[in-house]
Image (cartoon, rainbow, N blue to C red):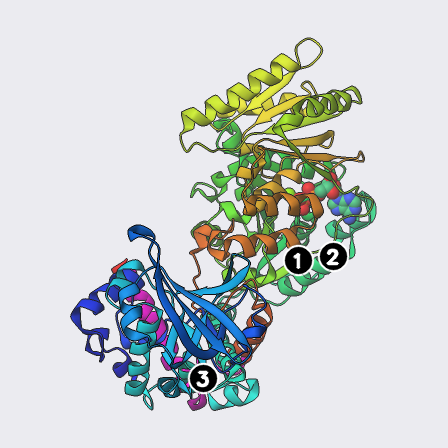
Amino acid sequence: MQISLLQTPVEYLKGVGPIRAELLKKELNVHTFEDLLYQFPFKHIDRSEIIRIKDIKSDAAYIQVKGIIRDMREIGAKRTTRLTAILSDNSGSVELVWFQGIRWAREKIKPNTVYLVFGKPTIFNNRFNIAHPEIEPIEETKIVAGEPLQPFYNSTEKLKSKGLHSKGIARILRNLIERVKGYIPETLSDALLEEQKLMRREEALLSIHFPADTYKLALARYRLKFEELFFNQLPMLSERKQRKLKTQGHRFTQIGEVFNTFYHNYLPFELTNAQKRVLREIRTDTGSGIQMNRLLQGDVGSGKTVVALMTMLMAIDNGYQACMMAPTEILATQHYDTLSRLLKDMDIQVELLTGSTKTTKRNEISEALQNGELKILIGTHALIEDAVQFNNLGMVIIDEQHRFGVAQRARLWEKNIIPPHVLVMTATPIPRTLAMTLYGDLDYSVIDELPPGRKPVKTIHLNDSQRLRLFGFMKQQIKEGRQIYIVYPLIQESETLDLKHLMDGYDSIVREFPLPEYAVSIVHGQMKSANKDFEMQRFVKGETQIMVATTVIEVGVDVANASVMVIENAERFGLSQLHQLRGRVGRGADQSYCILMTGYKLTSDARTRISTMVNTNDGFEIASVDLNLRGPGELQGTRQSGIIEFKIADLAKDGSILQLARAAAEKIIEMDPELQREENDMIKEYLKYLSSQKMNWGKIS
Ligand code: ADP
Ligand code: MG
């Protein structure tokens, strides 16, 4: 395969050589011809359009004008010297200015000659001028006649110092393309190209740099995005398919008495349509004889717990045990309490296993698990330990996915000879596009509807000078019997300083809200777990009205009577964290509030985050703003999954291409799971190549 030509070290390209090659490696991670070919321009500028000087109307965009140079002069003394020239066409004139490279400009630019001038106008002294324009005598411009869209490349100071500014990079790319033209292998099958109306790879890779027109450029970008996303999805879908082919699953043949009794007699509310739909999806999976691996996304408060419970009841009806794993002891305990309450009138044993479960209790649980009496076990990481042996585990629920890694998930599989079904639940909304790329090997369900009758949380932004208003409001809420969270961020990167920040806050709250009228709890990461629980419990029981905390309470805690969430230094939090925190209130019948306290001056990103919070309660909308602000690599819940970096695809914008690419990949995997058909040879080959690249990468970095 001609991949080898593309693997030629970039040093051997005309116009590069050892010094530039070294820099290209260091600065842009460009090692080979192929790497260079994949340095896509970040924009193109249309050089085919020439406007009349009179029509320069804005300083917003680059423009191109044609005219005669006149009246060149140097102005100002030594340090402030600048060179100006007047460019005129028959509609008017505009001043050109150089602050640097004056000697070069003086030598190169000849008065009374026609030039093509390209640059960005600025307004100075109420008139437009163009500083440091690109300027070429009109005859020479014919060279780029076939190249009306000029590519712009990222460069660095070091590269620029060796002549590899944007234009220099374009120059070596032109050499490269001359060299590799005719040798760029296709990676997609003819059938796929035809079906998806895709430009061929070679044409796309040439056109992305030097397109004939904007239409060609768009086709090229589309093709390359499609290819990138297609090859992102294909391995995951293939893995999923292999697993389904090879991994048998427990077949739940029936919805039985336990499920029905709960549903008809004890379910305290009507399920939302979204909850019903998800249960049907789970029912289909578990009835198929194939192991279920499903991701369930639902915003905070959307009612995932009861779906989890009913899923576990399906397992019990079919003679299996079920377990549910939560990331913290507080959460596990809370799930245990909730489920025990919901099941209290049914004859189903539920137990809790955490790090602090006493040995006697542990032994009891262990025995009941092994003889199969114990049907539902809730717990923390403690569940993964080898000592925990089930009689016949059929269903595993994992709550709050982003705290658990894939490896931990896998260990739960091993708890039965045939792996149990797995339902992963997350309350960190991830835009669907991101979910598909991160958890592409999982099937996907979403609860996109909140239970009826919820009053949306009101979100208010206050700055530090409005603190008295805040205190007044808090007092009034407490008088009405409500409870309040005050959350501090971790900011200083030093635990001691963070703690001091929190303690200062706590002191000022205690001063403002003194005993015996008020009681204040405090919880932070450096407290012993027993003390943390004790303080938490005081708040849960309503013995304290205010809970001062760091983000340890971020996940899952449920105190229905808490109706106010105050977030200090809210500008320091990411959007998804703010949304999680806000989700702690609004769980009861009362109107709830989220108050974002910030300093006076905010960066533009911080302002966007705060205003997004004030304007919407929709977790998915918030997640997409977050994706736009930060890019996929930084989103919460994505970190341990490995950062996905795309060369051209943009998950925030290319959701629909992703969907098409995924569907196409799915179809191929369905028809040809091992990619054995001749028509899929190229795809298979390229896939192999990509995974070998990835391995090399691992070694390098
Ligand atoms: P989350 O998805 O954040 O885990 P929970 O399962 O804790 O949400 O549910 C939040 C609250 O909504 C709980 O108090 C639960 O009892 C209640 N709830 C769940 N489903 C419904 C429903 N269909 N109708 C009314 N209330 C519901
Ligand atoms: Mg929950």
Residue position for label 2: 274
Rendered position, 514 above or below 474: above
Does any portion of residue 394 appear in the rendered image? Answer: no
Q: In the image, is 281 to the left or to the right of 54?
A: right
Q: Is residue 376 magenta?
A: no
Disc 2 or 1, which lies upstream in sequence?
2
> What residue appears at the point 83 percent right and 44 percent down from the top-left corner?
453
Residue position for label 3: 188
Residue 618 appears at what percent x and percent y?
69, 50
Q: Nearer the viewer, mark 1 or mark 3?
A: 3
Does any portion of residue 445 appear in the rendered image? Answer: yes
Residue position for label 1: 446
Mark 3–mark 2 distance (CA, rounded to whole Å): 38 Å
Q: In this picture, which residue range is highlighted in magenta?
A: 670-699
Main secondary structure found in the magenta portion = helix
Where residue 137 sits, quadrant-wise, is bottom left
Q: Nearer the viewer, mark 3 or mark 2?
A: 3
- Could you tell me if the residues under marks 2 and 1 are in contact, i.e. CB atoms within 8 Å? yes
- For ligand 1, the image quadrant comes to top right
